[in-house]
């Protein structure tokens, strides 16, 4: 009864994020990017703020190439794009990038980080297949939560659960955070101190969906029954029910513990590694979670969380921050926009491509990242583009690409050949990528990174050699100092040099006229380690 | 983020800081921009200011779990007591193991806490608990003591590292890594695992020193143009990290034990532990706020008494040398020395004449800065099996350490919008331990 009362209270308090305001939202037929700009601009107008102007072509190209394919653009890509006079060129660019195989690879890396950060495992092999087929987000969620390990193509998906199955608290907390944008772990020991939404019942209700999952014979398995008990702060022992975050309870008669003797036998059997894998249960609590969380009346958490996470990745700041604090005491910056996007993602079968495509077409995404007049407005207004630190793979691949002779990745290559070379760079980048930290919110670059770049043997050997296939190899051949500077800046910074840079770099080279090879290497180093290279801006 | 992210926030403290930073800025102008040496130390006014203002901490990490019974809480004559005697110390009424005669003479500087009950008895869990003072949450990794002190006591633009950790032994290293947790890599430890000199601190042969410096300046100028009109704390940290490179490279000498006169080296003795503790002193003297020196491996499940007969005298000797050295330099009152491990050892002696993991009633010592020296806090029962008086958990110990170093133990950090206090709400420092 208590649970029912709780549920009623929650409903009455208007907490269950519903899409009930749908009547007042912009029509679902409008293009996604227009809706983004409508709501973002409305808020800016309310605050009396004129947003930053649009980013120039070179900046937009670099930003969107990094976001969609995880690397900086090549010299030829920059030249072609900035020279193009097509009125539709940004749309064409986004289409081209999203249709390239690099898009799937980069998205797989990004989603893998989101799903597996903090574990030692990876679901990237699965994601490559799934995203390659443009599988919908709800389908991916189902594959990850209910992996069919007998299918070799699906087996890698099991890593999400397998990496966490030995710590059910972690599994419960991280699944809630990743898929529903809710951190229930504060409610493990006590009702959440600040957020009325989260009670111990929520944490243990969610845990009940996972408590029957275990690993046996190298495979995930699930028991028929199971009961999670917990103590309230007042010391009262309670039995948890299968309860979703909304308070929705799954009625079942499988909430029981195995009696003592049987439990012993059962544990022995679970540990026994011979024989065929255990049969799946007739009633799967985990499958119930998947089912309930996608029901029309319950799916708001799921839809809003993926919208917020994808938005956060592209804009560098979520509509709700932090990403795992989507609750009634933490309003979105643009409630109607989040509602509209959540409705849209549901109506379009959780199509991630549609969402990503729409967001990068918005004017809000394409603003300049400089704010020249006084203090920049708060990030949640999206008045100016965020400066985002590159992820380890973005940085490592971009470094590799920047030190490659532009001829090696020229526009004249066939698309298949171009992609093969990119794949080569990506696979050779893995080693360097491991030397960097994955940025979180408020990421701080550590001094170990600066020391590594300044004095690391690895950097010297991997990035600063001047063989024939390298940028430094090409620069060596050039006679004219201007050309050297032009090619260096265009290749590494993906834009033409400014006058003051020309002078700065020319002076640097001139002072080292007696040792030109070193001078070039030092100049390339200075560009690779500069803030402009380290961030997506 | 918290509005005042680096300091404890008391107005007095802020004044001192400003005074200090002002002096540093004024001093810096007098120096060549490049720091080929640690100029701060050579500027008498600054060095003096440093000594007066900055608090620091050396953690002697007794990896594997040293026995309280063979060190600071002997139980001679008890069935659990083992073969060693207890000896009186320079403080009437306080006795410690006969394996520590030198510390017995220096008892007036130290406080022994004999009543730790920290509950976690496995190496990994215990080490995490005793380095962080609390358990991680599934979605929140806490910074350890070193990272917190690096942030609270270090200077943002410091030219020296602010968290250095020596741990050469392979035993237990993986289960006791330093971690900046949610504070991020800015405060991560500079780990020394195999070499006394930190990684990547040495200029490569392929570039001369002047080019190395000017290459860095070129980098700075390019970055400065980029930063115009752009602001983010990540961007700021990138600039800061590179600004610290040359200073850190200049600090290479700090790690060089041979820079110390033979007289000082002799005092610490010829062991690796002695040398590392001596280098720890060099570091904190130069302004490094926190150094951990890991000494392994105390995990004496068998032959407990031989192990301790060998290792305790070394600890006794090195710790005493450190106390003397700090005192001679006028640094002891600004430096907190902690001996701590993941847990202590069982009073019960097992059939292999060993003692096993024991987190129920064990000891730690605090020496120097902010500590009531010559004191004992808490008590275990006759056989050392339980805490009899003044039980102390990891949280209270950490609150006490923070207070001894002048840090508000209830200060909040912000993880996103969520306030995270340095110690759990309601935790109280142990007043009797504090000076």
Image: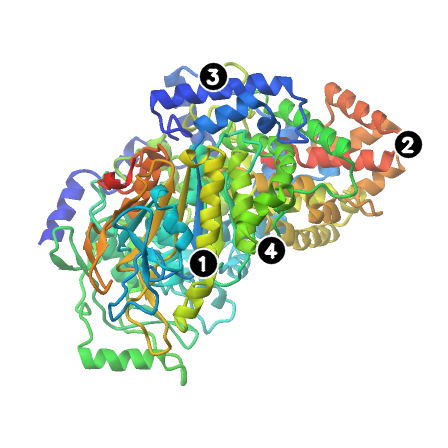
In this rendering, the answer to whether A354 lies above or below A267 is above
Asked whether, in this view, residue A80 is left or right of residue A341, the answer is: right
Chain to which mark 4 belongs = B
Looking at the rendered image, the quarter that the C terminus of chain B falls into is: top left
Chain to which mark 1 belongs = B
| Residue A406: percent from left, percent from top | 78, 41
Chain to which mark 3 belongs = A
Residue B313, labelled with which disc?
Answer: 1
Q: Quadrant of residue B244?
A: top right
**Is residue A309 visible to the viewer in this orientation of the structure?**
no
Q: Nearer the viewer, residue A3 or B188?
A: B188
The answer to which of marks 3 and 2 sits earlier in the sequence is: 3
The residue lying at 43 percent from left, 69 percent from top is B306
The answer to which of marks 1 and 4 sits earlier in the sequence is: 4
Q: Secondary structure at mark 3?
A: loop
Chain to which mark 2 belongs = A
Q: Nearer the viewer, residue A236 or B318?
A: B318
């Amino acid at each position: 009864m208590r649970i029912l009362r709780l549920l009623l209270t929650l409903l009455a308090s208007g907490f269950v994020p519903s899409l009930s305001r749908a009547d007042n939202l912009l029509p679902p037929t409008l293009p996604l990017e227009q809706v983004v700009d409508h709501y973002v601009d409305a808020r800016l107008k309310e605050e009396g703020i004129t947003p930053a102007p649009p980013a120039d072509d070179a900046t937009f190209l670099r930003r969107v190439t990094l976001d969609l394919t995880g690397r900086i653009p090549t010299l030829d890509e920059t030249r072609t794009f900035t020279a193009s006079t097509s009125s539709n060129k940004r749309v064409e660019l986004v289409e081209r990038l999203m249709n390239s195989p690099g898009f799937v690879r980069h998205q797989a890396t990004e989603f893998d980080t989101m799903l597996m950060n903090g574990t030692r495992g990876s679901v990237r092999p699965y994601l490559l297949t799934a995203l390659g087929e443009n599988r919908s987000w709800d389908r991916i969620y189902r594959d990850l939560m209910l992996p069919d390990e007998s299918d070799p193509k699906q087996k890698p998906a099991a890593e999400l659960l397998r990496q966490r199955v030995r710590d059910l608290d972690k599994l419960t907390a991280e699944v809630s955070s990743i898929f529903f944008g809710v951190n229930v772990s504060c409610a493990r020991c006590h009702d959440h101190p600040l957020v009325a939404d989260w009670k111990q019942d929520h944490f243990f209700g969610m845990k009940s969906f996972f408590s029957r999952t275990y690993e046996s014979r190298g495979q995930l398995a699930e028991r028929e029954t199971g009961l999670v008990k917990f103590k309230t702060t007042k010391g009262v022992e309670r039995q948890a029910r299968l309860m979703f975050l909304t308070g929705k309870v799954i009625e079942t008669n499988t909430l029981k513990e195995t009696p003592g003797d049987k439990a012993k036998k059962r544990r022995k059997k679970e540990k026994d590694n011979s024989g065929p894998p255990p049969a799946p249960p007739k009633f799967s609590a985990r499958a119930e979670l998947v089912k309930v969380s996608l029901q029309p009346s319950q799916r708001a958490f799921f839809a809003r969380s993926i919208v917020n996470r994808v938005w956060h990745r592209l804009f560098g700041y979520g509509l709700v921050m932090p990403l795992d604090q989507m609750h009634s005491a933490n309003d979105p910056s643009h409630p109607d926009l989040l509602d509209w996007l959540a409705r849209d993602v549901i109506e379009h079968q959780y199509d991630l491509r549609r969402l990503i495509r729409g967001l990068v077409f918005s004017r809000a995404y394409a603003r300049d990242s400089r704010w020249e007049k006084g203090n920049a407005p708060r990030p949640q207004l999206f008045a100016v583009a965020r400066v985002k630190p590159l992820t380890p793979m973005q940085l490592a691949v971009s470094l590799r690409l920047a030190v490659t002779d532009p001829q090696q990745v020229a526009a004249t290559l066939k698309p298949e050949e171009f992609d093969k070379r990119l794949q080569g760079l990506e696979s050779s980048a893995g080693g360097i990528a491991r030397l960097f930290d994955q940025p979180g919110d408020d990421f701080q670059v550590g001094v170990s990174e600066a020391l590594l770049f300044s004095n690391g043997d690895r950097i010297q050997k991997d990035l600063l050699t001047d063989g024939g296939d390298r940028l430094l190899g090409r620069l060596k051949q050039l006679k004219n100092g201007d050309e050297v500077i032009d090619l260096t800046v265009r290749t590494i910074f993906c834009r033409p040099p400014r006058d003051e840079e020309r002078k700065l770099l020319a002076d640097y080279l001139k002072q080292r006229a007696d040792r030109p090879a070193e001078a070039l290497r030092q100049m390339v180093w200075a560009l690779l380690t500069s803030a402009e290279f380290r961030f997506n801006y | 983020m918290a509005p005042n992210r680096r300091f404890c926030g008391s107005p007095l403290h802020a004044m001192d800081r400003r005074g200090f930073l002002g002096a540093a800025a004024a001093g810096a102008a007098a120096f060549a921009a490049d720091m080929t040496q640690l100029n701060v130390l050579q500027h008498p006014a600054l060095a003096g200011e440093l000594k007066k203002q900055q608090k620091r901490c050396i953690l002697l990490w007794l990896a594997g779990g040293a026995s309280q019974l063979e060190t600071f809480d002997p139980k001679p004559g008890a069935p659990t007591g083992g073969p060693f005697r207890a000896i009186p110390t320079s403080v009437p009424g306080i006795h410690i193991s006969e394996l520590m005669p030198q510390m017995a003479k220096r008892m007036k500087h130290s406080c022994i806490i004999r009543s730790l009950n920290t509950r976690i008895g496995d190496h990994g869990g215990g080490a995490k608990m005793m380095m962080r003072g609390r358990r991680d949450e599934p979605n929140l990794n806490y910074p350890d003591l070193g990272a917190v002190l690096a942030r609270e006591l270090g200077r943002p633009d410091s030219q020296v590292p602010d968290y250095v950790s020596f741990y050469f032994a392979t035993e237990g290293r993986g289960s006791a890594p330093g971690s900046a947790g949610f504070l991020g890599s800015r405060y991560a430890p500079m780990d020394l695992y195999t070499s006394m000199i930190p990684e990547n601190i040495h200029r490569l042969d392929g570039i001369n020193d002047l080019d190395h410096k000017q290459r860095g300046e070129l980098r700075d100028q390019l970055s400065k143009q980029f930063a115009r009109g752009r602001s983010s704390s990540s961007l700021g940290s990138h600039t800061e990290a590179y600004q610290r490179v040359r200073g850190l490279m200049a600090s290479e000498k700090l790690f060089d034990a041979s820079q110390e006169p033979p007289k000082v080296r002799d005092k610490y003795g010829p062991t690796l532990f002695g040398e590392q503790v001596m280098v720890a002193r060099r570091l904190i003297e130069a302004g490094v706020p926190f150094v951990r020196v890991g000494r392994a491996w105390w995990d004496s499940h068998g032959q407990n008494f031989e192990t301790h007969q060998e290792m305790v005298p070394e600890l006794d000797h090195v710790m005493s040398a450190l106390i003397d050295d700090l005192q001679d330099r006028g640094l002891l009152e600004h430096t907190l020395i902690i001996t701590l491990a993941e847990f202590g050892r069982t009073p019960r002696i097992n059939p292999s004449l060993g003692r096993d993991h024991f987190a129920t009633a064990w000891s730690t010592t605090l020496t120097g800065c902010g500590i009531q020296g010559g004191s004992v806090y808490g008590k275990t029962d006759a056989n050392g099996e339980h805490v009899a008086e003044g039980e102390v958990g990891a949280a209270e110990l950490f609150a006490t350490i923070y207070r001894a170093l002048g840090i508000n133990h209830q200060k909040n950090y912000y993880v996103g919008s969520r306030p995270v206090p340095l110690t759990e709400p309601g935790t109280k420092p142990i007043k009797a331990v504090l000076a």
